[in-house]
Image (cartoon, rainbow, N blue to C red):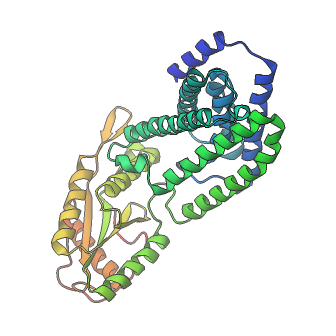
Amino acid sequence: MVLDLTAIGFFAASTDFHWHDLLTFVALMFCGAVCIEATRRLGMPAGVSRDLLSAWWLPAALLLPPVYALLAPIPLQMLLQKRVRETVVYRRVFSSAAISLAGGAASVLFHGLVGELDIPTQGTGGPILVAVGCAVLFTVLNTALIAIAAHTAVPDTRWREVLWNRESLTLDVVELCLGVLVAIACGVNLALLVLALPPVVLLQRSLLHAQLQAAARTDPKTGLLNAAAWQREADTEIVRARRTGETLALLIVDIDHFKRVNDTYGHLVGDQVLIGVAATIRSQLRDYDVVGRFGGEEFVVLLPRADVTEARRVAERLRSRIGRMAVPADENMVTVTISAGVAIMSMHGDDLIELLAAADLALYRAKELGRDRICLPATPVPPARRPGPEAAPS
């Protein structure tokens, strides 16, 4: 934030402001505001969400002096905070600073390489290629800054989860292309923004609709699958394993004495413990393992192609890593332990209900034996009951 303010002050002092630049900047910010207002009724999913506002930030970086690229995120982030979804202020501030610094760097590089050359009116490919390269720089810097912040907040998160996956990379390419095309249209004639705005709004609404559909499958607090979505995916994996004859394991993980954390430190710290445990579990599993929050302080994990040895090894690794996790609370560091029940397909059950019942009994056994341990059912069990989200003890 300090670096961003310093950069804004430096470039503001060294920039000659012209009415045409100010008009272009206001027009781009107006288009961004229209995008936000047009999608406001859809809402915005909790957590990290994606938008297409780079379609308006990138033209500011490519067409205007660097100070405008540094200032561009501020009004739109304020509008998002007030009109779409209020979030913790420091997150908005950091996001704005990250976008600002990335846009400023891209603008400085572009104007340093191209100078005052007008991209579209020259009709040559060189400046446009430079514009694309600077747009890539903007995307890389912005993603890197956000990823560093996310990884610092939750150190157990894998870097590939906070950097790029196939979906986020596709969205970055779309944003890059939109930004360059809007910049070219704006450079030809500012009035062409009227033609560029409707397609961007439509793409923005489509993107948010897809994100909201995905959010309906996830637990808003931890980002894991919710109970209903997890059961659907687990059923699919079990049918596949039964058809192919492969092994499969199911874990029910419960945080020991979680109520004490809430009673002692408050629910906000309890939420941070849940988030930390969820991130640790996710970081220790394979991409195709199915993990969800089953309710309260209970998590469920399905391990395709895992036998009893592999399942115990994974469960012990989770127990060990979570036991070393610490969440700050005022002047204290909160630590927790977990208990887990393990059930193996064909050994303890043949469908999801039987496996859940067996793992639930094993979890009760782990609790009775003193907690902070991993247990299997004492003997293969028939279906007893279907545990709900709050079935396991605290």
- Residue 360 drawn at (x, y percent): 30, 75
* Residue positioned 37% across, 78% down in the render: 237
Q: Locate residue 361: give its quadrant.
A: bottom left
Q: Is residue 27 visible?
A: yes
Q: Locate residue 303: give its quadrant.
A: bottom left
- Residue 389 drawn at (x, y percent): 43, 70
Q: Tell which of 312 and 141 is nearer to you.
A: 141
Taking 71 as reference, is 382 left or right?
left
The quadrant in which the C terminus is found is: bottom left
**Residue that extends furthest to the top in the rendered view of this protein:** 13
Q: Tell which of 219 and 109 is nearer to you.
A: 109
Q: Is residue 40 visible?
A: no
Question: In this rendering, is residue 162 above or below 94?
Answer: below
Q: Tell which of 147 and 112 is nearer to you.
A: 112
Taking 355 as reference, is 190 left or right?
right
Question: In this rendering, is residue 32 above or below 287?
Answer: above
Taking 154 as reference, is 192 left or right?
right
